[in-house]
Amino acid sequence: MTQHYQHIMVALDGSKSAELALHKAIHVALRNQAQLFLVHVVDTRAIQSVTPFDSDVYKQLKIEAQKMLEEYVQQAQAAGLTEVHQVIEFGNPKTLLATDIPEEHKIDLIMVGATGLNAFERLLVGSSSEYILRHAKVDFLVVREQEDLF
């Protein structure tokens, strides 16, 4: 029996790897006639360690995330998807991507790029993909970088 997905979530951080995940997610959503959720999580732990609380910083980060996601929405719609949703959250990306956002939006497939952070950030923050793999209650697909993927 093949899985039919209805609510697909792709985590986006602006990296090349995340964009590859987006392209694959668009194709999977088209094949399944699914809704696509474009998700960006601003890691507030990283912000707090750099700057004291400043609402202007959060507003600017949200504006930048909205611009990025809007470009991705346009790509998805140009490919033929009609139900594309944007989700921007502030907090711990691991828990938000693994459980909170999927539960809230009834996600049945989570897709992420293989790498989004540089090696130093992975050392400090840890692998979000590994955390999602261990804690998500739905299918999880890590998109690897491949030449000529599409």
Image (tube, rainbow, N blue to C red):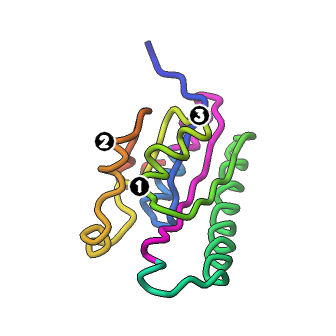
Residue picked out by circle 2:
134
The structure residue drawn at horizontal position 33% and vertical position 42%, both measured from the top left corner, is 133
Q: Residue furthest bottom?
A: 51
Q: Disc 3 or 2, which lies upstream in sequence?
A: 3
Q: In the rendering, which numbered label is found on residue 94? A: 1
> Residue at image x 61%, y 84%?
54
How far is mark 1 from mark 3, CA to CA? Answer: 17 Å
Residue 145 seen from this side: no
Residue type at mark 1 is: Lys
From which residue to which does the magenta span run? 25-46
Where is residue 105, by image quadrant?
top right
Q: Between disc 1 and disc 2, whose residue precedes?
A: 1
The amino acid sitting under disc 2 is Arg
What count of labels does the image hold?
3
Q: Give the percent coordinates (x, y) of residue 32.
A: 59, 28
Say whether residue 37 is left or right of residue 100: right
Disc 2 on helix, strand or loop? helix
Residue at the limit of the structure toward the front, as seen here? 53
Residue 94 lies in what quarter of the image? bottom left
Q: Earlier in the sequence, mark 1 or mark 3?
A: 1
Image position, residue 135 (x, y; %): 36, 41
Separation of marks 1 and 2 at Cα, in angstroms: 11 Å
Question: Residue 106 bears which disc, if any?
Answer: 3
- Say few, some or many: other residues with alpha carbon within 10 Å of mark 3 (under 14 / 14 to 19 / 20 or more): some
Closer-to-camera residue (18/97): 97
Query: From where the camera sits, is residue 32 visible?
Result: yes
Element assignment for label 3? loop
Crowding around mark 1 (Cα neighbors within 10 Å: few <14, some 14 to 19, many 20+) is many
Task: Say what amino acid the circle numbered 3 marks.
Answer: Lys
Q: Marks 3/2: CA distance?
A: 18 Å
Residue at x 50%, y 53% (from the top left corner): 11
- Image: 133 above or below 60: above
